[in-house]
Image: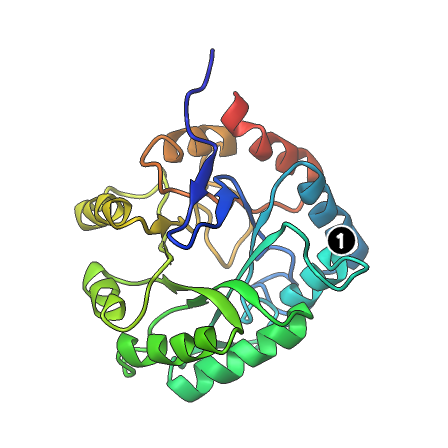
Amino acid sequence: MTNDLNTTFTFLNGRTVDRIGYGAMRLTGQPRNFGPYADWQGGIELLRRARDLGVSHIDTARAYGPHDNERLIADALVDDDGSYGEMFIASKGGVEKSATSISRDTSAETMKRHLDESLDNLRTDKIDLYYVHAPDGITPISESVAALEEMRQTGKIDMIGLSNVSRSQVEEALRVAPIAAVQNRYSPADARDEALEDMIDWLNDQGIAFVPHGPLGANPMKQGAAVNPSDALRTLLPRAPNVLVIPGTTTIAHLEDNAAALAA
């Protein structure tokens, strides 16, 4: 059967990415995605295999580890010339993690500090896409985004994203700066959320990417998918042309299956 889905998405700034990427969160210590990945060399090999398969969109966050996941990505994907080549790297700031707790701080000062730490971890001068990981409930989203827009103007990031947000928060952010992507929980395994469904369509009308996290229905603090990965991807990709999926895995076999989903 021929699949007529568009295989790429083009952001408003002209950057084009494949619609199937890779979410790197699981390449951290377990449980709770804390500490360095136990098989560091295996993680490097998996990320390089993803690149060989044509997977260019890699999603990470400062909180994964914290720091360790970004550093693993740098070890795997920074080329001899010190660049990521054609790879598209997305990361996030605003979440603090310890061995026992997770907290949010999206104040302007913290967003700038987290971004600088992400730049150091990833060994790069510019990150393609940087998200507000999750609003802290105190700082207006406009202030968090204004801080990232300041960093975008100085050349430290190319695009701004928002994660775990409502439509009203996206609208507030858009009054401050261009928003390239929204990353919220969305999976065929989850109960239908009409407000989220409407937001996906609205984002598509705005030319903003929607990047589901947890696309396989997994608990972010536990391993294992709730639905078959290939079935989930074949459900999510036709949902709207702005949907970019970032399934995560720790095995090359599953990585290869996920990368082939568009061609199936």
Residue 144, relative to residue 160: is it above or below? below
Q: In the shown orientation, is residue 86 left or right of residue 233?
A: right
The image's colouring method is rainbow
Is 7 placed left or right of 40 in the picture?
Answer: left
Task: Tell which residue pokes out farthest to the top in this image.
Answer: 1
Q: Which residue sits at x=58%, y=63%?
A: 33
Q: Quadrant of residue 188?
A: top left
Q: Residue furthest bottom?
A: 109
Q: In this view, does 68 lie above or below 182?
A: below
Against 224, is 160 above or below?
below
In the rendered image, residue 109, in percent from the top left (x then y), is placed at 43, 88
Indicate the amino acid at tag 1.
Ile
Q: How far across and how far down the image is residue 263, in percent?
A: 53, 23
- Res. 94 visible in picture: no
Q: What residue do we see at 39% from left, 81% from top?
A: 147
Q: In which quarter of the image is residue 39?
A: bottom right
Q: Name the residue under label 1.
A: 44
Nearest to the observer: residue 95 or residue 77: 77
> Where's residue 141, x and y in %?
29, 75
Q: Looking at the picture, how far across and down is residue 198, in whole percent? A: 19, 46
- Residue 158 visible (yes or no): yes
Number of marks:
1
Left or right: residue 7 compared with residue 191: right
- Please state which of residues 78 and 11 is positioned toward the viewer in this rendering: 11
Residue located 68% across and 34% down the image? 253
Compared across the picture, whether 122 is left or right of 218 comes to right
Q: Residues within 10 Å of mark 1 (few under 14, many from 20)?
A: some
Q: Which secondary structure, mark 1?
A: helix
